[in-house]
Image (cartoon, grey):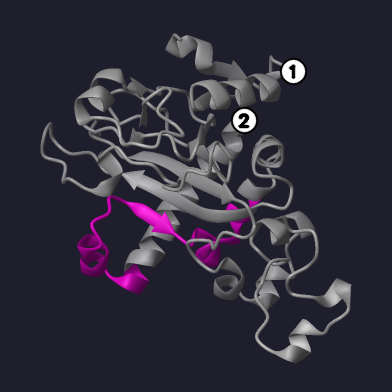
Amino acid sequence: MKVSETRLCCQTNEHWLEHALCLVRDVGYAVVEGVIPSAMVVETSDRLRAVHERIVAEIGADRLRRAGELGILRLMMKYDRFFTHYLEVPQVLAVVDATVSPTAIMHLQNGFILPSYPVDTAPEVAQNNYHMDFRRLLNGYCASINVFIAISEFTTENGATLVVPGSQQKTEKPDKGYLAANAEQLTCPPGTMIVFDSTLWHASGRNVSGTDRLSINHQFTRSWIKPQIDYVRALGDETMLLLSERTQQLLGWYSRVVTSLDEYYQPAENRLYRAGQG
């Protein structure tokens, strides 16, 4: 399948979701343009940089460097509630509902400010080596889906994401040579949503453009899978109660683990782990 055949525009294709789901099933990914309005893209860029400064100030540049990551921003909602708006985007919610169900939770939301390096000088980290974001194969059962948002334009020069079509749901890791030979680079305009099966083999490209490349990765899973961060506890009840019910759902508000019999024996509407969570 040609790369162009995996691209859709939700503004001009009323059947974009149906087509995207077929692509994710058959080749592992779909590129959906026109999802995030330009004004939100611009605001997101500014807020990503501001959050980055706050994280560095709190955790320390040396500690972050020792973690072996390139410009990953975790728990952004703690520093700026603006990033909860990405859990309200209709196209994102449509994908979540149609794949990992309306009771899914967000496994992670990570911002990326991918720095530029001279050719062949970028450090080797997990991001720029081919990997799966969900390493458990459940006989084709969809337990996890990624929704990746391009904030910068994705180009070959700034390290647009590399994916290997058809590599999802494989019981054995593909050979390195096969991955390199068959990878497709997903160049796309800002505001694009890249949807992929979390078992798809992919990697960050190498940024040699001279400027940072910005994006946000979301991973959504079935509610019984633990998130990367306990977002409910990290954000706190006061913040959680300010959010919409759907956002609360996605952050795990309805699938919390009880810590006492008093919490367990509550009326249905007050239970921390509510019925019907999948």
Crowding around mark 1 (Cα neighbors within 10 Å: few <14, some 14 to 19, many 20+) is few
Q: Residue at x 60, y 34 (%)?
A: 36
Toward the viewer: 71 or 132?
Answer: 132
Quarter containing the C terminus: bottom right
Q: Secondary structure at mark 1?
A: loop
The image position of residue 180, as x and y in percent, is 24, 25
The magenta-colored residue range is 57-85
Q: Quadrant of residue 10?
A: top right
Q: Main secondary structure of the magenta part?
A: helix
Is residue 39 inside the magenta stretch? no
Depth check, front residue: 278 or 187? 278
The secondary element bearing badge 2 is classed as: loop
Q: Name the residue beneath numbered marker 2.
A: 35
Q: Nearer the viewer, mark 1 or mark 2?
A: 1
Q: Is residue 156 above or below residue 104?
A: above
Residue type beneath disc 1? Glu
Rendered location of residue 132, percent (x, y) = 38, 42
Q: Residue at x 39, y 47 (%)?
A: 112
In screen coordinates, is 132 left or right of 35?
left
> Mark 1 = which residue?
14
